[in-house]
Image (cartoon, rainbow, N blue to C red):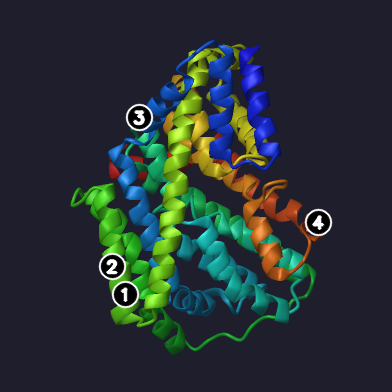
Amino acid sequence: MQIIIIFALFILCVITTLPIAFSMEISTIAMLFMQGDKNALITILTKAFTGANSSSYLAIPFFVLAGALMEHGGNSKRILKFANGLVGHLRGGLALVTVLVSMLFAAVTGSAVASTTAVGSLMMPAMNEKGYDKAFTASLMACAGTLGPIIPPSVSMIILAAMTGESVANLFLAGFIPGILIGLFLMISGYVYARKNNIAKEEKLPKREILKAGVSSIWALLAPVIIIGGILSGVFTATEAGMISCVYSLFVGIFIYKEMTWKTFITAFKNTVNTSAQIIFMAAMANVFAWILTRMNFGTICAKLLGNLTSSSVVFMLIMVVFFLIIGCFVEISAACMIFIPILYPIARTYGVGFPFLIIVLMTMAIGQITPPVGVLLSITTGMQEISVTRTFKYLPSVLGAMLAAVLLCAVFPQIITFLPTLIGTL
């Protein structure tokens, strides 16, 4: 009964548009008072401090800053030109370019919002001019933007590593193939749309132009290689990788591309402070919320319920996909991970799928960034296109279906997720 009450309080707070972190805090305080804890506020402060007091979280502001510096340093334009040279001449070329640029930019910034705004501001007007429906463009761009947390380096993966003790390097490696799968399926969706609506092909760029664009973008594309390569080789830790990526991004923006100004530099720092503070505060409150749920034996209840439902790891994964699809409609990806991973990850390990479960959660919750009523990325793209969210409902089934197909494929065959870490020998 108490579990029902605390979730009801939490949902009520969310419905009243309170931030997720405050919703977790208020519902926990209310429950502690209901349980007769006279020192509820002191308990909350202690648990919150414990939740945020992790050295692993030091990497977060550095990766957020590196992504912001990359976003404002001229990387997106060069990556766009290179991607356009590779696939722009194919049927539905601009749709393919949009997805490919998002994949490459995700590997540079690791942020869904940054990828969506940076790539969307460049690609959506171009697609509109070539006859793509604004609603389809907004839907495709929102879906492509979700690749930020999946293709490494990813802030969400660092959070998961801090919460579960899994290796950051392994999570980074595990995200590559699922991210590429989602990208390929979205490209197919864009190609089908272009054929159906007879969108004209673009002219193919000369090989010299493509090579020139590739050389120009190599500084941007080297960032994830340096980060992931350094972590895998043991040269530096995830936190040190974040510091190095900041220095590298600053160097490229100032001395190579020469587009980093004091104004964009200060903007990048402001965005980093705001984003990092939100993430760390949410981590603190999520630790409090997870603690009270654990105290009420929520994890044990879930384990018994799932144990009664199935003994199959595949069925367990499919149940989790459905669960997080529903959760993703109401709760932001970081908050959902912080609330439910401490409870569900140990259960996933009993099924032998603890590691791939984490990537499946990220992939499934990525869909939640598009689905209403929250749908952060869809709100961004429809706002940029100056259209209503309801106009996208015509196209969402096809693009979301492409994403869901990739999620289900990885859920049924978790070897897709573990392939690279196993191949390299780190898992």
The residue beneath circle 1 is 252
Measured along the vertical axis of the image, is residue 241 above or below residue 423?
A: below
Q: Pick whichever, 67 or 11, lies toward us.
A: 11
- The nearer-to-camera label among 3 and 4 is 3
Q: Is residue 248 visible?
A: yes
Label 4 sits on residue: 390
Distance Cα–Cα, label 2 vs label 1? 6 Å
Mark pair 2, 3: CA separation: 32 Å
Residue where numbered disc 2 is placed = 248
Question: Based on the displayed image, in which of its 4 quarters is residue 383 positioned?
Answer: bottom right
Label 1, residues with CA under 10 Å away: few <14, some 14-19, many ≥20: many
- Local packing at callout 2 (Cα closer than 10 Å; few below 14, some 14-19, many 20+) is many
Q: Residue at x 53, y 17 (%)?
A: 32
Name which residue type carries label 4: Thr
Nearest to the observer: residue 2 or residue 256: 2
Q: Amino acid at mark 3?
A: Thr
Work out whether mark 3 precedes mark 4 in sequence or the reverse, and give the earlier one: 3
Q: Residue at x 27, y 66 (%)?
A: 247
Image coords of residue 26 (percent x, y): 57, 30
- The foreground one among 157 and 21 is 21
**Among numbered discs 1 and 4, the one appearing first in the sequence:** 1
Q: Is residue 181 left or right of residue 67?
A: right
Q: Which residue is mark 3?
A: 50
